[in-house]
Amino acid sequence: MFGLDSLFDFNGDGKLDVFERAVEFQFLDEMTKSENSGSYGNEDESDVFADAGLDYDELEFMGRDERREALEDAGLDPDEFDF
């Protein structure tokens, strides 16, 4: 399917099984994510929110002002995150 299939054919049978395909998709997903250049480095934003006791999905559905207040209350800089 992809040009990288041979890299993920761990058992060398010429076909990707479910596990090998999943590893390939995970690799491709990680490679296509844009790097976060904020002050939180490479830590995933959802991990930052979870560490602060916040839920990313809830923040996403909040209004701008409500989200800003929730982030500030959790000790995070709202300007560091792009929703």
Image: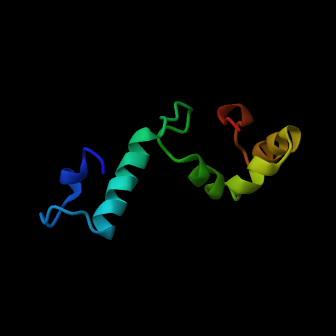
As drawn, the residue found furthest toward the left would be 12
In the picture, which quadrant includes the C terminus? top right
In this image, 11 relative to 17: left or right?
left
| Residue 64, above or below 62 | above
Q: Give percent across and percent down for residue 78.
A: 73, 36
Q: Residue at x 50, y 46 (%)?
A: 43
| Residue 77, above or below 71 | above
In this image, 18 relative to 30: left or right?
left
As drawn, the residue found furthest toward the front would be 1
Q: Residue at x 65, y 33 (%)?
A: 80
Q: Which quadrant of the figure has residue 12?
A: bottom left
What colour scheme governs how the chains and residues are painted in the rendered image of this protein?
A: rainbow
Q: Give percent across and percent down for residue 68.
A: 81, 40
Q: Residue at x 17, y 63 (%)?
A: 10
Q: Residue at x 19, y 60 (%)?
A: 9
Q: Give percent across and percent down for residue 47.
A: 57, 54
79 or 29, nearer to the observer? 29
Q: How many marks?
A: 0
In this image, 56 relative to 43: left or right?
right
70 or 9, nearer to the observer? 9
In this image, 23 relative to 63: left or right?
left
8 or 75, nearer to the observer? 8
Q: Give percent across and percent down for residue 76.
A: 70, 42
